[in-house]
Image: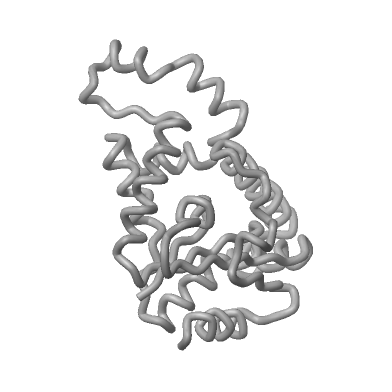
Amino acid sequence: MAVITISRQFGAGGRTLSKMIAEKLNYQFLDDQILQEIARQAKVSKNTVISMERIAGGPMSRFISTLLSRNYMERITGKDRGYMDEDVYVEALYEVMQKFAAQDNVILTGRGGQYILENFTNTFHILLVASKTDRIDFMKRHYDLTDTKAASAVTAGEKRRTSLYRKIGKEDYNDPLHYHMVLNMSRISLETGVDLVCRLMGQ
């Protein structure tokens, strides 16, 4: 019974590797469920949560939070209507990640899991890294993107990652000391990565 968090440089294959490990270990790979639960708690749509994940920690999110505060929106629409800003998102994210981690035998990818679950027992934190060239190539091969779109996706993904960690007050997300294992996906295959993680889990 364990929990695995997988953090990654954008385009290093985190979601793909997570799904492969989940299948091998018979764990739950939780992604869409996290979005749905955050949406349920905040009384907003899943698409609203997705949009917030794209801008949390950035200037647009701060602008929205300042212009349309929670108290202001509740006065306008009533407390029963949903509301989402970056503070609501991060608060719900902590609650939801910890709730799902308590189930055990789950894999959580991204969203600061290595920090949120830092002190959870029997939780293993993995970081995936790769050269930017290889990450762009991964996006091209696995998501059928052109060179330009793949490069843009990697750049935009890294910006979102930086912004989110800034919002939760962390900037050392690439520090290997946070992790039980760091996998350089420029040097190993996905299959080897799965094998190494499973060995870490005693499988």
* 164, above or below 128, in the image: above
* 127, above or below 46, in the image: below
Taking the image as shown, residue 100 lies to the left or right of residue 179, namely left
Residue 188, position as x, y percentages in the image: 69, 80
Residue 187, position as x, y percentages in the image: 74, 78
Observer-nearest of 88 and 199: 199
Taking the image as shown, residue 53 lies to the left or right of residue 128, namely left
- At x 32%, y 41%, the residue is 39
Quadrant that contains the N terminus: bottom left
Taking the image as shown, residue 134 lies to the left or right of residue 20, namely right
Residue 134, position as x, y percentages in the image: 74, 68
Query: As drawn, which residue projects farthest toward the bottom?
Result: 203
- At x 52%, y 52%, the residue is 115
Residue 197, position as x, y percentages in the image: 54, 79
Query: As drawn, which residue projects farthest toward the left?
Result: 80
- At x 36%, y 80%, the residue is 26
